[in-house]
Image: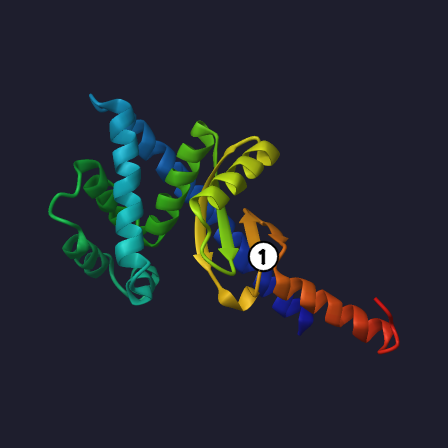
Amino acid sequence: MANAHEHARETVLEAGSVKSRLAKVYAEALIAAAAAQPDGPAAVDALGVELGDFVAGVLGASPAVAAFLASPAVGKRAKAAALQAALPGNASDLFRGLVTVLTTNGRLDLLGGVAAAYRQLLDDRAGRVRVKVTAASELSAAQREALAATLAASLKQQPVLAVRVDPALIGGMVVQVGDRVIDSSVRSRLQNLRTLLLDKGSSYVL
């Protein structure tokens, strides 16, 4: 039973890896197409914003839409019609072309992945890195600048901070860069202290 479960897990991970690679291929082709436009660099950046806004505003805001596009039970035409209806009237030709290609290839479920890969490729070129910060309270402009400077010196890249507030942390913050997590929250320290006390017994003296 355990072997079957592990095999299923590996299959899911492998499928995810294949999707990521395919999404990157589409993103690279899209960047090349945008770069070939008369306004080259500006077109590349504008398309990145367009992709990101659409994915966040449509797919991100409605998990049902994402599930609809990923469902093998839904035909290509139905998916294409739904997505075309959701496209803004001022959608660029490149964006519409991407939707057409993904529809033809039966890969509309990759749209979110293509947007993420596109952003990652642009970040890599510009030496940027996305950093998720969860703080116990709002960070002031000075605190954000200090944190960004510290991260830039450590990572050797320009951090782009995405900050959210979680009062449950009590104090401090949690910083995530990719798969790396730095947890300096008071909640985490209290949890570690609790574990230490349980391990050492109630007679342990700090």
**In the figure, 116 relative to 7: above or below?**
above
Is residue 36 visible in the rendered structure shown here?
no
For the C terminus, the quadrant is bottom right
Q: Residues within 10 Å of mark 1 (few under 14, many from 20)?
A: some
Q: Nearer the viewer, residue 5 or 59?
A: 59
Q: Callout 1: helix, strand or loop?
A: loop
Give amino acid for label 1.
Gly
Color style of the picture = rainbow
Q: Which of 153 and 40 is in front in this view?
A: 153
- Relative placement, left or right, of 83 versus 123 is left
Residue found farthest to the left: 89
For the N terminus, the quadrant is bottom right
Percent across and percent down for residue 112 are: 35, 51
- Relative placement, left or right, of 118 versus 15 is left
Q: Which of the 4 quarters of the picture holds residue 51?
A: top left
Percent across and percent down for residue 44 are: 29, 31
Percent across and percent down for residue 38 are: 20, 21
Residue at 27%, 64% (x, y): give it: 74
Q: Nearer the viewer, residue 79 or 134?
A: 134
Percent across and percent down for residue 187 are: 62, 66
Residue at 25%, 35% (x, y): give it: 46
Residue at 22%, 36% (x, y): give it: 94
Q: Which of the 4 quarters of the picture holds residue 40?
A: top left
- Relative placement, left or right, of 202 versus 55 is right
Is residue 52 visible in the rendered structure shown here?
yes
Residue found farthest to the top: 38
From the image, tell me which residue sits under label 1.
Answer: 172
